[in-house]
């Protein structure tokens, strides 16, 4: 018996991106049986653009306003409205290839269909800065262990029963909500499948300020959800060593610059490995600019996370429901 598939998404002030999302959804080789979108209170014309799509949509397109809702609340509201036994989730700001949904759903035809199907994502840069940011901040497929991959809600599908079993997305979180949702799905022993060809493209942040705000919120979200404590402690330790070695090289002896170099190499090494593959396709001038952007982007992102994480921890100690705390503290 064929599945009834609902594609859901949330939007907030996405007037510049919503047409790209909708046109790529309408062009799918396997159309969804319905599309449900929650608008979190847009004031830039997003809602009006979505309503224009209702007239030409080849499938039912349901739009509902939910001013002030966060992403988790919006996704849960959309799933509650949806009729499908399979929920496919994507996001505003992405561009979908025409076979995205068909590829994402393909594992359902196996002899042991999964409960959750993880798609994948890649950068869709519009400038050199965005190209460098995408190259160094996103995992490459070769780095992914499918057995432990936590899907992004830019490209994921799951059964309605799976969503019900874990109580939906955690509405007390404004960021990292999809990670906590993934961990809950894993913890109850649901079956996962990895569909890396169900690829979506999304645009990285266009400038350093918006990137800083994004990573500050990611760090704060980790603190709220009690995620990755040892990673954050390692980041503080590395930058403490970096700062101390610079100070000692000034006050005591220049040889301490060797410690500075080692700490800086530790900060940059993974990002440099990722960027190296991108550099081969660039003209020389862009290669130089990219290498200059590399430490600026990495250090900005690390500082943003280091400032955001303790703010999230303080929030968690006061407000977080203990029964919903994440179980990943690595």
Image (spheres, rainbow, N blue to C red):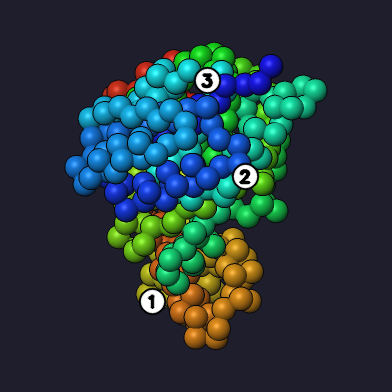
Name the residue carrying label 1: 250
Q: Does dot 2 land on a helix, a strand or a loop?
A: loop
Q: At 49% from the left edge and 66% from the top edge, which residue is drawn?
A: 131
Residue 84, labelled with which disc? 3
Alpha carbon distance from label 1 to label 2: 58 Å
Q: How many marks?
A: 3
- Residue drawn at (37%, 75%) of the image: 251
Compared to residue 265, the image places residue 44 above or below, namely: above
Vertical position of residue 173 compared to residue 231: above or below: above
Name the residue: 37% across, 27% down: 62
135 horizontally vs 194: left or right: left
Which mark lies nearer to you, 1 or 2?
2
CB of mark 3 within 8 Å of CB of mark 2?
no
Q: Residues within 10 Å of mark 1 (few under 14, many from 20)?
A: few
* Lateral position of residue 157 relative to residue 19, left or right: right
The spot of residue 44 in percent (x, y) is: 21, 47
Residue 249, x across and y down, in percent? 43, 75
């Amino acid at each position: 018996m064929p599945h009834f598939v609902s594609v859901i998404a949330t939007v907030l002030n996405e007037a510049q991106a919503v047409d790209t999302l909708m046109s790529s959804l309408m062009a799918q080789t396997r159309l969804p049986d319905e599309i449900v979108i929650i608008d979190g209170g847009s004031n830039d014309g997003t809602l009006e653009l979505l309503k224009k799509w209702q007239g030409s949509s080849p499938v039912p397109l349901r739009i509902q306003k939910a001013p002030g809702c966060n992403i988790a609340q919006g996704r849960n509201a959309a799933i509650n409205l949806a009729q499908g036994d399979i929920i496919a989730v994507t996001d505003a700001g992405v561009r979908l290839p025409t076979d995205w949904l068909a590829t994402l759903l393909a594992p359902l035809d196996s002899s042991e269909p999964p409960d959750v199907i993880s798609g994948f994502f890649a950068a869709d840069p519009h400038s050199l800065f965005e190209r460098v940011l995408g190259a160094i901040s996103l995992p490459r497929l070769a780095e992914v262990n499918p057995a432990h991959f936590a899907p992004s809600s830019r490209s994921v599908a799951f059964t309605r029963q799976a969503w019900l079993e874990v109580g939906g997305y955690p509405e007390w979180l404004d960021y990292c909500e999809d990670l906590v949702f993934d961990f809950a799905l894993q913890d109850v022993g649901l079956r996962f499948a990895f569909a890396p060809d169900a690829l979506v493209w999304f645009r990285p942040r266009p400038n350093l300020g918006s990137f800083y705000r994004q990573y500050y919120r990611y760090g704060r979200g980790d603190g709220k959800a009690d995620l990755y404590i040892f990673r954050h402690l390692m980041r503080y330790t590395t930058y403490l060593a970096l700062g101390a070695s610079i100070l000692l090289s000034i006050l005591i002896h220049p040889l301490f610059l060797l410690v500075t170099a080692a700490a800086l190499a530790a900060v940059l090494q993974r990002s440099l490995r990722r960027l190296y593959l991108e550099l081969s396709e660039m003209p020389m001038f862009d290669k130089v600019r990219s290498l200059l952007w590399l430490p600026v982007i990495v250090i900005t992102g690390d500082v943003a996370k280091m400032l955001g994480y303790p703010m999230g921890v303080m929030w968690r100690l006061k407000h977080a429901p203990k029964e919903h705390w994440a179980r990943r503290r690595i």
